[in-house]
Amino acid sequence: MVASPDFKSSVRKVALLGNPNTGKSTLFNALTGMQVRVGNYPGVTVEKKVGRMLYQDQSIELIDLPGTYSLSPRTLDEMVTVDVLIGRQADVGTVDGVVCIVDASNLERNLYLVSQVLDMGLPTVVVLNMWDVAQTRQVSIDVEGLRQRLGIPVIVCEAHRRMGVDDVRRTIAMFHMLSAAMPPKPFPAEFYNECSALSAKLAALGECDLPFYLVERLLIDAGGSIEKSFLDKYQPIEATSTETANAGNQSESLAQFLSASRERLRVANCKVPMVEAKARYGWVRQLLAGVATIPKSRTKTRSDRIDKLLTHRVAGLAIFALIMFLVYQAIYSWSEPLMKVIELAQKIVSDQVAASIEPGPLRSLVIDGVIAGVGGVLVFLPQIALLFFFIAILEDCGYMARASFVMDKLMTKIGLSGKSFLPLMSSFACAVPGIMATRVIENRRDRMVTILIAPLMSCSARVPVYVLMTTTFVPPVIFFDQVVFEGTFFERHLGIGLQGLMLFGMTSLGAVLAVPIAWLIKKFAFPGETPPFVMELPSYKWPSPRVVIDRVYDRVNSFVSRAGTLIFATTVVIWAAGYFPGDHTELHRLEGQMAQTEAEVAKLSEVKAPELLDAQRRLESMTAQRNRIGSELVEHSILGRAGHVIEPIVRPLGWDWKIGVGVLASFPAREVIVATLGTIYSLGGDVDENDEGLKSQLVDAKHSDGVTPVFNVVVAMSVMVFFALCAQCSSTLMVIRRETNSWKWAAFTFCYMSGLAYCASLLTYQLGMLMLS
Amino acid sequence: MATLNDLVPGERARVLEVMGDDSITVRLMEMGLTDGEDVELLGRAPLGDPIEYCVRGYRLSLRSDEAKRVEVLRLDDAPVG
């Protein structure tokens, strides 16, 4: 977009900034309503949220920056934030002002960030949010006094109750009339002298008019990203340019200049980077002296008593386990009826379409491609909505930080932090909401590792595969079989069943392997020191329904609009691969006849006509023929041919081409293999994992020699191990692509999981066969 | 010399210095652990780590590895203020 010279007509941009847990998102939602665009900053994982705020006849673009404690850019979030504020983020352009949200009950630490924002020299407004919490903490603030000392507007607000939001809106609309804030200059004079010298040095290099904040940061952050970018830029020029080399003092490189400057500061007792925190907190103290009284000794609040209980050695762990159990139950079981409703709706729509479109490629595309694709996206919504409902409540009431606090020690054993627990636990129900929940992890490295191992957790889509294989091929042996309450109503067999053991083993396999894999990913893909776990534990409060609803809507919306399209596309592509090429006329003719016969049967059964039996028999034989043709068509489709092509690759796993096709067809979702096997074994695609016909077909299946059975317990295990570890879930891959903002990580996940699945499956089959023989 | 890691629940101490000069040190200072500040240990997580402190009127959680970097003067029996 080309900036218009007429600034009144160009869209004004205002950035929203604040510490985490200050209600920034709540204020953002209150200011913008639902007019929000969510995306990513180019090339990074940082989420970009831009909304439109309307005030009278004005429309202003609001940029919701990531929550941050400081503007010394060390993390990706902080770098993006600083770049946006100093106008270096190309896709945002220059911002016209900053709204800095401050937790009024935690003034000192929040004003630290304000002091950095003021150094930016932009028009700034301070919003004192969470005014109610400050009142209960007996923090008293003289707002007018603070306003005078800061020289900028200070607005009192309770965003979750929409109190003060109109004031904020009005002030933002008047931003263009505000002059830039006066930088507070909290550092000792020596520091500013060095800054001026550095500015001069940079000007000599051709960097005129740099934002003052950038110069400050360049001096303070030794080895930081800004220093690195400057040194990279000027090192080669200085080395090659003879002119500068001859210019005596000018030849001093930027690196030398910086280290000499820092050394002078150290001698003058303002050692960087330590001088910053001390200087800024000193400024905050001075600023607040006389305008705010913060009770010296903390009064024991209700929050303290709740905290005592929730972090208690025994009660704390018990309550934690209970809450996590509840969340897990919700996404695993409670979501089920809702998912059933979606599946039912999908079936009703499909039937409607079937009734109105003649059998043919179009009908197949609409039903098996489009409707199945839409259903495949919608079916995730109950789990996502429920998980984020709980996450929003836990975050808003302040428990989320405690959950991480309680679990941290355990999670450090696998090199992660307590924040990874909930996303990984949720992945046991489904990796899609689990990966979306990794947004609670601020540290990029921990978040990436969590995202990459989350799909190894055994999700509910693997269960049908396990059940089919286990109940069909694992003998129902019971160890330590004992009968209790013999002869009574309560008579029960107690013991350890082999089938149950097998299911347990398969369910644990991925989680157990995730430990070494997390270690490997960290060691090779994200080397570096362990990130600190310096975290604020916010005070407890009642969750605000509005915040919870906003959050759920936001996540569901982002899933549908950002990952939904890709999931949909995958379903359509796999449908096409299973449909083309192949002459479907015979199949469609049969389906047409079947529909007629079905109607006939229905009519006959009403009047109990003697021809009913005959019609039913005809329908049965037609169904059998349709299923046989369907099976042949799949065998000769692109998918079926691919299954034959990969047969030599899957042979060492003990599989035939049919299992190969099943694996290929289940790329959109693991459980699809059951229906695919049903189609291939001429039973139609409507079978489920408890279908006795499918089970007996699998038992009877023979290799091409007609003698050797395809399946035995070892092959079944090889299939299960493969499905435990493989990445046959395009939805997960698409969500990884969206969350990491890169196809690279989706491809990486697919490759490492497929490789792992193949090797583990190979090992299982080969070792198993050795033991059998 | 005592560090924040040596305190017992309910004990208060005054920060002397945060050791080291890497990004973790800077982060600890940015969170308000500058010299001269008073800190109270509120409690430990059920599994013993991390540890919850009160600093500048808010609650901060640190792992003991991070708490060990913060040198403090115990204020046990010293009169407050």
Image: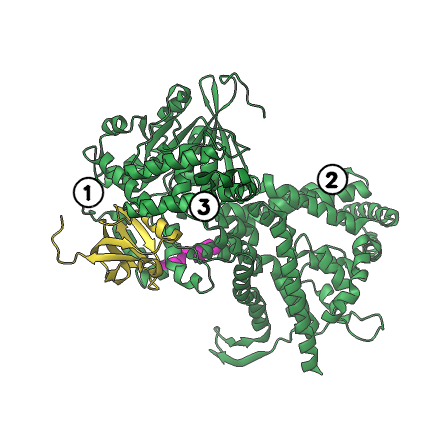
Looking at the rendered structure, whether the residues under marks 3 and 1 are on a common chain is answered as yes
Q: Amino acid at mark 3?
A: Ala
Q: Amino acid at mark 1?
A: Pro
Task: Give the chain of mark 3.
Answer: A
- The stretch of residues the image draws in magenta is A319-328
Label 2–label 1 contact, CB within 8 A: no
**Closer to the camera in the image, A342 or A717:** A717
Q: Residues within 10 Å of mark 3 (few under 14, many from 20)?
A: some
- Left or right: A567 as drawn, with respect to A654: left
Q: Where residue A741 sits: x, y (%)?
A: 58, 45
Report how far apart the C-alphas of labels 3 and 1 lie in the structure: 46 Å
Q: Secondary structure at mark 3?
A: helix
Q: Could you say which chain is coloured green in the image?
A: A
Q: What quarter of the picture does the C terminus of chain A occupy?
A: bottom right
Report which residue position mark 3 lands on. Answer: A255
Q: Is residue A326 magenta?
A: yes
Q: Secondary structure at mark 2?
A: helix
Q: Could you say which chain is coloured yellow in the image?
A: B
- What residue appears at the point 25 percent right and 28 percent down from the top-left corner? A149
Task: Give the chain of mark 2.
Answer: A
Q: From what the image shows, is residue B28 above or below residue A58?
A: below
Report which residue position mark 1 lands on. Answer: A295
**Closer to the camera in the image, A132 or A672:** A132
